[in-house]
Amino acid sequence: MNAPGSARTVTPPEHVFDWLDGIAEQRADAGLTRVLRARSAEEGQLDLAGNDYLGLARDKRVAGAAAAAALRWGAGATGSRLVTGSTELHAELEYELARFCGAQAALVFSSGFTANLGAVTALTGREAAIVTDKYIHASLIEGCRLSRADVAAVAHNSPEAVEHALATRRKQRALVVTDSVFSVDGDLAPLRELLAVCRRHSAALLVDDAHGLGVLGDGGRGAVHAAGLAGEPDVVITVTLSKSLGAQGGAVLGPRRVIKHLVNTARSFIFDTALAPASAASALAALRVLQDEPELAERVRTRANELSTRLHEAGFAVTVPDGAVVSVRAPGPDDAVAWAARCAERGVRVGCFRPPSVPDGVSRLRLTARADLTDSEMDRAVTVITETAPPQARR
């Protein structure tokens, strides 16, 4: 190391990023290298890896709405929402989302990630404390990092741990942050208990309902609605439009004054190009399909439970789903990658989650049920997963 003030050795341009090679080697040795694999539009694989829970991404009503909006409004929004990017479609989507989920108002962002960044940072700051479940989504974690607030990550799904952190905080304002349905194992947060804790300690509750919207609650209105917390004055909800609604984008729902505050302060809203009109239109069309066909939500839950039960009976360590996500434990990261690859070779795409994406350090296959899965597709999925499993994957 050079002494302070001494001249540094000049590194040739072609060697400036040599440090990346060592890190890449460490990743490879740990079995954690990630690779992008492009898929074609006509690919015939059975998809149990994506988050198209209701099977609406390719629905002609949804895709047709996107195409019509692109022809009418253009390929992109052309600017941020506060400049030129806010269209009638965005406003209509916000109105219908809020009404459907039982919130006073909603604000559409370009993604669920930016919605979480905006909500967490705008509702906290240096003078606030944040208490989070330690298994929250990466977008919420990034929001906490950027917030400059005091952050305490506590034990998973533990209202008692949240209460202790709130009781011992140093800042007056506080925000409790949790997923509703956790993305890795699909387990449900104790939302009623968490809100009761928040109220005992004058804190607000922010719930990421990305995996609850379209799956849980009356007609798919989400986990917050199912818990009886929709419209509460101290509850804020974030959602993504890219899962059950099969489109793209995100939104924050909650009290009207919270939404007005985000419009004026959320940097991931103010300085980001608006969601493309085609995506807003497809999300709106999907929401209307869900309103017309509320049985879709129950159907995806039924399929998830069937998948879990059958894999459990086949001898695997599998989660009992609260939503659409089913997790199957793998012996290790290399085994999980190889298992997923063998499934793909047999025509079934499954998710492969491993450290550092999973906070508990456990590698697993992550399966997502869909409302449109047929009986024959269910049989095929169970057969392929079972026949390709490493021997040590069974209990």
Image (spheres, rainbow, N blue to C red):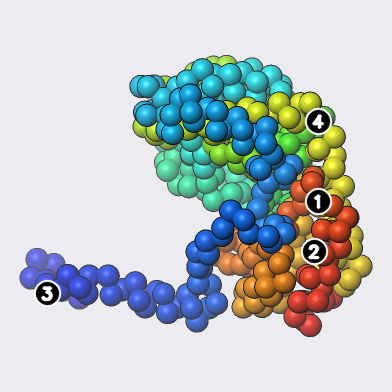
Q: Residue 101: x, y in percent? A: 70, 25
- Label 4 sits on a secondary structure element that is loop
Three-letter amino acid code at disc 2?
Answer: Ala
Q: Are marks 2 and 1 in contact (CB under 8 Å)?
A: yes
Query: Whole-Å distance between the Cαs marked 4 and 2?
Result: 26 Å
Three-letter amino acid code at disc 1?
Answer: Leu
Q: Of callouts 2 and 1, which one flags the residue occurring earlier in the amino acid sequence?
A: 1
Can I make out residue 56 in this image?
Answer: yes
Three-letter amino acid code at disc 4?
Answer: Glu
Q: Which mark is residue 381?
A: 2
Q: Give the residue pinned by disc 3.
A: 9
Q: Of callouts 2 and 3, which one flags the residue occurring earlier in the amino acid sequence?
A: 3
Q: Is residue 157 above or below residue 76?
A: below
Query: Whole-Å distance between the Cαs marked 1 and 4?
Result: 16 Å
Q: Of callouts 4 and 3, which one flags the residue occurring earlier in the amino acid sequence?
A: 3
* Identity of the residue drawn at 43% across and 29% down: 74
Query: Whole-Å distance between the Cαs marked 4 and 3?
Result: 67 Å
Three-letter amino acid code at disc 3?
Answer: Thr
Q: What is the crowding at mark 1: few (fewer than 14 residues within 10 Å), some, or many (at least 20)?
A: some
Q: Give the residue pinned by disc 1.
A: 373
Q: Give the residue pinned by disc 4.
A: 293
